[in-house]
Every structure is written in C-alpha cells, then in structure tokens.
Image (spheres, grey):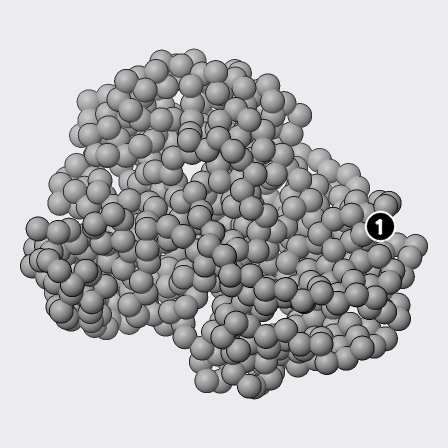
Amino acid sequence: MSGIEVVSPDSHLKVKIDIKDAITYQVFFKGKEIIATSDIGFQLQGEDLMKNPRVKNTIRSSADETIQPLYGKFKSLQEKYNEVRLDFQKGYSLIFRAYNEGVAYRFAAGLDKEMIVSNEIFNVNILNDPAVIYPETDNYTAWELMYVDYASQSSIRDGKKAITPVLFSMPGNVKVVIAESDVRDYPGMYLKKGEKGFYADFAQYPDSTALGSWGFVSVVQRTRDYIAKIKGRRDLPWRVMIVTDNDKDLLTNELIYKLATPQSLTDVSWIKPGKAAWEWWHDALLPGVDIPSGMDNRNTVLYKYYIDFAAENNLEYLMIDAGWSDIFDLSKVNPKVDIREIIDYGKKKNVGVFLWCVAMALTDKADEYLKMVHDWGAVGIKVDFFDRDDQLAMEWYETIARKAAEYKLMVNFHGCSKPTGMQRMYPNIVNYEAVRGGECSKWDLTANPKHHVTIPFTRMLGGALDYTPGALRNCSPQLFRPVDPGLPSAQGTRCHELSMFVLYDQYFAMLCDSPSEYRKDPVILKFLSKVPVVFDNTKVLDAKVGEYALVAKQKGKDWYVGGMTDWTARSFTVDFSFLPKNGKYMAEIYRDGDDASLWATHYIYEEKEVDASSIQTFAVSAGGGLVMRIYKK
C-alpha cells in the first residue's frame, strides 16, 4: 500500500505514508517536500512484527475541540487536526496526525503479552542541508546543555548525538523542530546523525545501578540489549515534527502539550502556580540584615525572614533548598531548621513552603516521606538529581507525580530530563528544569543573552522551565565574571533579566536573588510583586530564533510586555493594538539606560498613557531588554 496521505486543516502540511517492505513517510509544507523518504518502525526481541507490513484496516478521523488547561499562557487551546489510523495484521497500529502547527505519529501495540523493544526506528531526512541548533551530548544523563549552532547538518559528524527538541532552519525561513510527546514508562528520545539524516537514539534498559555523582545519584553501570519492556496493549510516545515559516509561531506552539495524555486528576483546587523566594542561588546571604545568614547558617529565623519578604511582596511561596535535612532520610531534619515552625509561620503569612529532596530519597520511601511532608503542612517538593531518562527513570517521574498528587503536593522537577507533556496529565508538576539556567552564572559564561533568546524557541516547546531568573547584579560581558561561593552576577541588562518573567513559561517562578538586593530597588520590586506566572492570552509581537523576542501577555484586564535581545543592540517597536479599543491605559515601562551596554544595572522607569492606536519604539542595549505592565486607567 502506498500514497496514504493526511493533510493539516489549513492544507499547508501533508504527510505521505508508504507501506511496502517497510514503512516510510514524507512531509510536505506549502507544496514543497521538506522531509524526504524516511524510515519508521520498531524492533522486538524474538519477533519481527515489522517484516512485510500489511494493513488490514484504515480509519480516518478529525478533531476540532477546545482544551481548557488548568493553567498556562492561554486560558484555552484549540486542538484541530486530521488523523489516519492504520491497523496492521500483526497486531499493532500506526497513527499519524496533521495539525496546522506540525505533524506527529505514534505506534500502538495491541498484543496480549509483554514485549521487549530492542529499538525504535525514527529517521528524519530533512532536505536542503539546513542549519541546526543542536543540544549536543555524549551521554544519556545531561539536559542542562548549551546549544551548538551548525551552519549545515552536513557539518555535523556522523554519530553526534543531541537531546530533543532539535531545531532545523531551512531556506525560506522554514523551521522544523523534532521533538516527542507523551513519554511514559519508555525511554526519552535523542537524535543521532547518520547516513540518511538523523535517527532516534535511546538509553538502554538498566541492568544494574549504583550511587555515584556526589554519592546520591543513581548511575547506570550496566545495561541490557534492549530499550524497553512494554505491555502488549499500549501506545508508544508521539514522534513530533513542528513546522513553521514564521519564528513567532514557535513561541505559542503547544503541540507537545496537546498530544499528551489528558489530565488524570479530579480535585485540582490545591494546585496553585506562583512565585517563590529562594535562598540557594545567592548562598542565603542577606547583606545588611542583622541575623545569621549564609549557607552554613541556615536556620529558622533566616527562613522566617524569607517568608516575611515573600508576604510583603505578593510571593506565594518559599522554596527551601538542600540542607534542611539528611540527603536520604528526610525525617532527619537539620537541628538549626525547625521545619514545622517555619511552615506554620508561613501559613500565618499566607506563604506556602516547598522542600527540596533528591530523587533517590523517594525511590523506596515515596509514600512515607511524601505523607510526612504533607502532614507537616508543606505544599510542594522540589525533586532533584534524576540525571537519567531510561525507561526505569521515566517511571520514577510519573510515580512521584502521582503519589505527590495523592498527598496534594505540587512538584518542581530539577536535575531532570526535558518535559514531554506529563504536566498535562499531572498538573501538580508546576515546573521542570532541563535547561541551562541562572545557576550557571555561578560557574561559567554559558547563561548569556544569546542562550536566553534560543531556549524559548526550542526547550520551552516541551513545557515550563525552571531557569530561576531575578538576578539584580547585572553585568555586561566586559564586567561579568562567575562567582561561587558568594553573591553571583548575571549577564545582560536589568531589563533583560526582568523580561524573563514575561517571556519564559515558569509556573513556579523563583526570585533567585537576595531579599537585601531587591529591597534596594523598590521600583523593580514593584514589577516583580505584580507580574503573574500564568496568563489568559499571549501575543507574539516580534521574534527571531536566537536573536530576539518580544511578547505581550494578558492577565485579566492587565497586559505585560517582555522583550529581550542577544548581544546585538536593536530597537523594539511595540504596536499596542493588542489592547481593547475602548479606553485609555497606563504603561509602567522599564527600559535600558543609555549606557546599559556597559553598566547593565542602569535602566529608565517611566509611565506613559497608551491605547490601542499607540505605537512606540524603544532602544534596546546589547544584551538588553524591555518590560511593561499595562493597566486600565
């Protein structure tokens, strides 16, 4: 059987599926082939289901529905696609969907027995030798990566591997992003350069593990000769190809979320995204405050001070990081830190408390420790140092999310693999790290403005990111240097840093710097206390991958604008036509100072009256940014 086609609702995308001795596909965009004939399939131990595939049934369907996320950057999402399902004689199916924003497929197994998957075949043979933004890695344990920019895919050596999403830039500004969705009880997908484009690559199933990497991370020592053991009746993850010729579309693309398993929780009243005070990034130092501070002096009084700061500035949470307890036994609490007293104090101030732990602490005692944390009155956990995404590790994520939900605990995954939509099924997962974030400012030069305007177009396609912004010791490249231990700085201007609170999807958003630093600048603190973490609508005003982004987001009657640039100075023109046409608005504007390209902390604050007909242009420094809060007069 050949020439099976599925076309997107707007007719711009088309997938052609051919079934002969093997299964292949092609992708066309606006009439042009962009992915040439590429192989797909999966290999089982002891059985060759894919040999001479024969279709016994073809079912076509379509959908045009509205999804109501519990929270996000849109109040609702439109899910519209055309689908073809091919049922094969040997007991498996292949489902292809074409959305306006991309195409995706998955295999579904339909056998009444356990199967051992030796490998899954996903080949993507992109034409015209595109440039590639490649989060390159040589292992299966790292996701906080820099992106390697290749001028052409042919310049990537065969065998070079990357985590997904991977972004390809073709002629005509066509962008193709390869990603995955709905990874559950199955290893995460990497891309590896090969003879005919790129091929899926997966961590093998662990055979034995041991503690390594600081003594509290589970490290795989040996593996078996397969990637997964699966039940005979189940769906495999979606293989996703996001396609657009407008960079702005990538900043609102929710395809990975749409493809994921719908919400499984019924009572979600306790899930409340928000902002948090946090001590770790600035080493718990409180200059000018007359109480013991610093990482070696973490104590009950210090954490009450953070709660007071949070309460005074509309921050919903305090995040208590490593050091409050024994690494493996969470019941052994640091004697200087009275967790119950801190949590009770927070409740009086309407500030919830998140507690940090390593993933290994929950592997055998998840119920015991999660119940204990819940009984203390904490509202969430930050689970760190997974450092794996093989099948067993991916089971941990879902088990922890499910059990945390049973005890009404929100979850911030850190030291984790990239998100693939599990936060839709378990919306108590309020954030993922899986990004080279602000912590790297303590050690190296990698958390820089070029990086900042790349990750919204790539990593953020999978879901919210725990970048941990908010640094107020802002530096130009001439003056920046890493600091650890001590009070670190960040690259880019102060307005660049502020813009992250609008541009980045972060539903549990840290304010990474010291309360002492924020108190020095009440004007900045005014913005940080008001900017929300979830929004009703998002409008992308201008964007170019790896260069700049300018976005407006709505929350109720208020709008927030955030823009940032790489190390190139430029101008941002804001067309305020996103505002309702009836009424005058006041814009609180934070823009780079005239000398901010050198003195990055310098900014100008001003208030201007605007309406839907207003158009204003702002100069943005190298590594700079622009932020606004707009409210009706």
Residue under the image location 44 percent in, 47 percent down: 69
Q: Identify which residue, 268 or 546, lies in the foreground.
A: 268
Q: Amino acid at mark 1?
A: Leu
In terms of secondary structure, where does tag 1 sit?
Answer: loop
- Residue 191 seen: no
- Residue 257 at x, y percent in the picture: 51, 53
The residue under label 1 is 111
Which one is nearer the viewer's eye here, 218 or 164? 164
Q: Nearer the viewer, residue 160 or 349?
A: 349
Kindly indicate the quadrant of the structure image that contains residue 306. top left
Where is residue 232 drawn, in percent x and y? Answer: 81, 47
Compared across the picture, whether 52 is left or right of 440 comes to right
Residue 248: x and y in percent read 38, 69
Q: Is residue 529 left or right of residue 227?
A: left
* Residue sitting farthest toward the right: 46
Q: Quadrant of residue 582?
A: bottom left
**Which is nearer the eye, 185 or 197?**
185
Residue at 68% across, 50% down: 187
Query: Image point 27% across, 53% down: which residue?
Result: 554
Q: Quadrant of the N terminus?
A: bottom right
